[in-house]
Image (cartoon, rainbow, N blue to C red):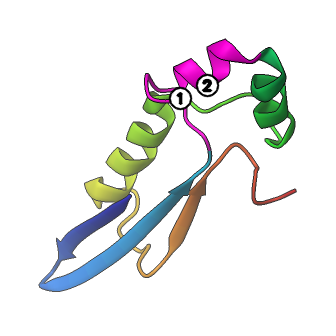
Amino acid sequence: VMVKRELLGVDAVLTMSNADIDTPMLQPWVAGSPEFAAYLDAGIALGHLGKPADVAGAAAWLASGRESGYVTGAVIPVDGGFTAR
């Protein structure tokens, strides 16, 4: 997910890197195999798949520019700690 916003005439480009998110596209894989679901969960430090609201909240924060105005050129991991493992 990439967010671009303009601050005082300067573009800020930010990227979010997310782990597996519990969406309708992933559901057939997870529902069809409890072992696969457990495998995915085990790879995430928080122990569960992300929700679409997790990604949406991070994107809204980045796009707002109010609280994130000094953040630029960054890749923000929205992955429940996947990259920290």
Q: Quadrant of residue 45?
A: top right
Q: Amino acid at mark 2?
A: Trp
Q: Is residue 47 visible?
A: no
Q: Is residue 12 toward the left or the right of residue 36 in the image?
A: left
Q: Which quarter of the rendering shows the N terminus? A: bottom left
Q: What's the amino acid at mark 1?
A: Leu
Q: Marks 2/1: CA distance?
A: 6 Å
**Quadrant of the snapshot with the C terminus:** bottom right
Q: Is residue 41 above or below residue 5?
A: above
Give left or right: position of 43 versus 65: right
75 or 62: nearer the viewer: 75
> Residue 65 at what x, y percent from top left?
29, 61
What residue span does the magenta drawing correspond to?
A: 20-33
Residue at x 35% of width, y 68% of height: 69
Residue indicated by mark 2: 29
Does the stretch in magenta take in 30?
Answer: yes
**At x 37% / y 49%, what residue is drawn?**
59
Residue at 76 percent of width and 49 percent of height: 81
Q: Which residue is mark 1?
A: 26
Indicate left or right for 51 with 79 as reference.
left
Where is residue 49 shown, x and y percent of the image? 66, 30
Is 65 magenta? The answer is no
Q: What is the crowding at mark 2: few (fewer than 14 residues within 10 Å), some, or many (at least 20)?
A: few
Name the one closer to the observer, 67 or 42: 42
Contact (CB < 8 A) between labels 2 and 1?
yes
Q: Nearer the viewer, residue 47 or 5?
A: 47
Q: Residue 61, percent across and down?
A: 38, 50
**Residue 76 appearing in the image:** yes
Question: Of helix, strand and loop, which one carries label 1?
Answer: loop
